Structure formats: C-alpha cells, structure tokens
Amino acid sequence: MKPILLTKYGETLEIESPSYLTDTEELPKCPDVYAGTHSVCGGIIFIKPVSETHFVVFCSICGRITEPIPDEVCTYGRLRQWCEERNKKNTEEEDRQVSRRFLSRFEIDRAGDGASA
C-alpha cells in the first residue's frame, strides 16, 4: 500500500504491509496496535482514541500528528481521503490568511503614502 500523506508538511504514514493489504483495510483503533511508521522520525504510528467519536494518528516518538479525526474514517482509504481533504482545506485557509495580511499591510502603506505602520 502506498504511504498516506497525513499533513500538508509531507508527513506520511508508511505502511509496511503484506501485498494483500488494501485501502479497504480497517484502521487498528487500539492504542497498542501498530498501524505503520512515521516518515519523519521512524516512530511507530498508532491510532489513538481521544473521545467516543474521534481519534488521532499518534507517533510513539513525536506525539500527536493529526487533529482529531471522526470515527467514520474507519479504513486506510478513508483516512487517505480525509487527510487529502483536510490538507487542501488547511492550505487554502493559510493562503487566505496570508492574502489578508498582505492586503491589510498594502492598504496601511497606501493610506500613509508608503510609510510603514
């Protein structure tokens, strides 16, 4: 199975699996069951419940990698899809924030005839 991109920063869940394991495989939602390895530090990845309705992807070395994920994300394939959607949304939001800061700065400079605030 190909790695799952967990964050927009390139962190992946590496799954060293038998050839028959596919995206339809259930996630092991037990804090002591191995789900894969963390591409950044090589730590063991676990799927750790944080409430009755959510879990996080947790690294044995780095700690929590993802924000809470709804329990409906129950397979490796759905985790891949959820992370792709969340990464895109987070990137778009970050781009909007950068644009707002830039435009805000531009308006201040323009109003002050180019003087910095």
Image: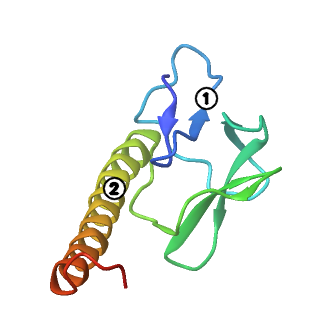
59 up-or-down from 117: above or below? above
Q: Name the residue under label 2.
A: 91
Q: In which quarter of the image is residue 39?
A: top right
- For label 1, count other residues whose C-alpha is less than 10 Å away and answer few (under 14), some (14-19) or many (20+): some
Residue type beneath disc 2: Thr
Identified at 41% across, 56% down, the residue is 73
Question: In the picture provided, is 87 more to the left or to the right than 18?
Answer: left
- For label 2, count other residues whose C-alpha is less than 10 Å away and answer few (under 14), some (14-19) or many (20+): some
Q: In which quarter of the image is residue 91?
A: bottom left
Image quarter of the C terminus: bottom left
Identified at 39% across, 39% down, the residue is 77
33 up-or-down from 58: above or below? above
- Foreground residue among 80 and 19: 80
Pinpoint residue 98: horizontal percent, then vertical percent.
Answer: 32, 65
Q: What is the CA distance from the residue labelled 2 to the residue labelled 1?
A: 25 Å
- Foreground residue among 10 and 104: 104
Pinpoint residue 69: horizontal percent, then vertical percent.
Answer: 47, 65
- Foreground residue among 83 and 107: 107
